[in-house]
Amino acid sequence: MGTQEDRIALAVAQRAGEGADAARTAGAIVALWEQVESALTPIIGQRGVAALYRRSLYLAAAAHPWLEPQQGPQATMDLAALKSAMTRQDSTDAAAGGVAVLQAFQTLLISLIGSSLTLRLLDAVWTPPSPSSGSPTQDPSQ
């Protein structure tokens, strides 16, 4: 299927939609972060997710200086600040920066808990929604 980095970029592109502006791209990336937080908070805690998020921002800011790493020990991710920073960029830079933070996060998580567990925990986040006509479908197995 491609590398995990490709899956992250594809997840962002599919959720934002074709020709998305920076605001729509930012919204798609924030939605992905909310899914990441939901998937990982029961396992590593809200503070653990926030700490990895802050480190990911710091790492991604090396290539995307407009990303504003959060200062100090915060118990939550400041997704509003990320969204605000992204909407001030053009759509290409917003997407590249947002994907870079998600990729850095996944790389950090792999270094801590291993590739197999990371991929199992985040697979549902990177998998695009089913191509239904926009209406949720019910899965009888759930």
Image (spheres, rainbow, N blue to C red):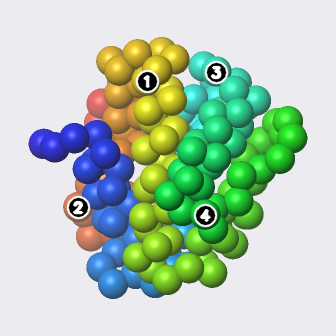
* Residue 21: image location, x then y, percent: 46, 84
Q: Which of marks 1 and 3 is in front?
A: 1
Disc 1 marks a residue whose amino acid type is: Ile
Label 3 sits on residue: 44
* Residue 102: image location, x then y, percent: 48, 47
**Alpha-carbon distance for marks 1 and 3?**
13 Å
Q: Is residue 54 visible?
A: yes
Most foreground residue, 21 or 112: 112
Q: Nearer the viewer, mark 4 or mark 2?
A: 4
Sooner in the amino-acid sequence: mark 2 or mark 1:
1
Q: Nearer the viewer, mark 2 or mark 3?
A: 3
Disc 2 marks a residue whose amino acid type is: Pro
Residue lying at 86% horizontally and 41% vertically, measured from the top left: 72
Label 1 sits on residue: 110
Label 4 sits on residue: 65
Q: Element at badge 3?
A: helix
- Proximity of marks 4 and 3: CB atoms separated by less than 8 Å: no
Q: Element at badge 1?
A: helix
Sooner in the amino-acid sequence: mark 2 or mark 3:
3
Residue lying at 46% horizontally and 53% vertically, measured from the top left: 100
